[in-house]
Image: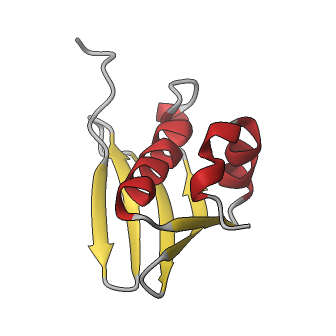
Amino acid sequence: MPDQLPEIELEDRGSKGRYLLRGPDGAEAEMTFTKIGEHQIIIDHTEVPDEFRGQGAGLRLVTRAVEDARAAGKKIIPLCPFANAQFRRHPEWADVLKQ
């Protein structure tokens, strides 16, 4: 299926990392994060190029971070305005939101 979204990749670079979706033309939608100690991450930036608009790519990236944080017992600080807005729309993510 040509309209199927690619898998989300995780790049872990020690204290920083990013989740990304690569488009067939090389475009990348990404969400970057910074680790604070062992139990918290800050989502600092989400960028979705036009090729991914309207496909829910940004929401997929944040959702994956929430799932990973939940599995690892971590909390998320959504500094990025997009991620912050998604947390407000998804009260079921409250368990991983750093209060």
Residue 59 spot, x, y in % from top left: 55, 38
Residue 61 spot, x, y in % from top left: 46, 46
Residue 86 spot, x, y in % from top left: 68, 43
Report the residue at 44% width, 54% height from top.
70
Which one is nearer the viewer's eye here, 86 or 92? 92
In the displayed structure image, the side of residue 80 where residue 36 appears, left or right = left
Q: Quadrant of the C terminus?
A: bottom right
In the displayed structure image, the side of residue 50 where residue 1 appears, left or right = left
Report the residue at 66% width, 67% height from top.
98
Report how many numbered discs are placed on residues in the image.
0
Taking 48 as reference, is 5 above or below it?
above
In the displayed structure image, the side of residue 6 where residue 66 appears, left or right = right
In the displayed structure image, the side of residue 78 where residue 42 appears, left or right = left
Q: Quadrant of the N terminus?
A: top left
Furthest toward the top, the residue is 1
Q: Coloured how?
A: secondary structure
Taking 38 as reference, is 99 above or below it?
above
Q: Does residue 23 appear in the picture of this structure?
A: yes
Residue 20 spot, x, y in % from top left: 37, 52
Q: Does residue 29 appear in the picture of this structure?
A: no
Which one is nearer the viewer's eye here, 73 or 88? 73
Report the residue at 36% width, 55% height from top.
71
Please tell me in which quadrant of the rendered image residue 2 appears: top left
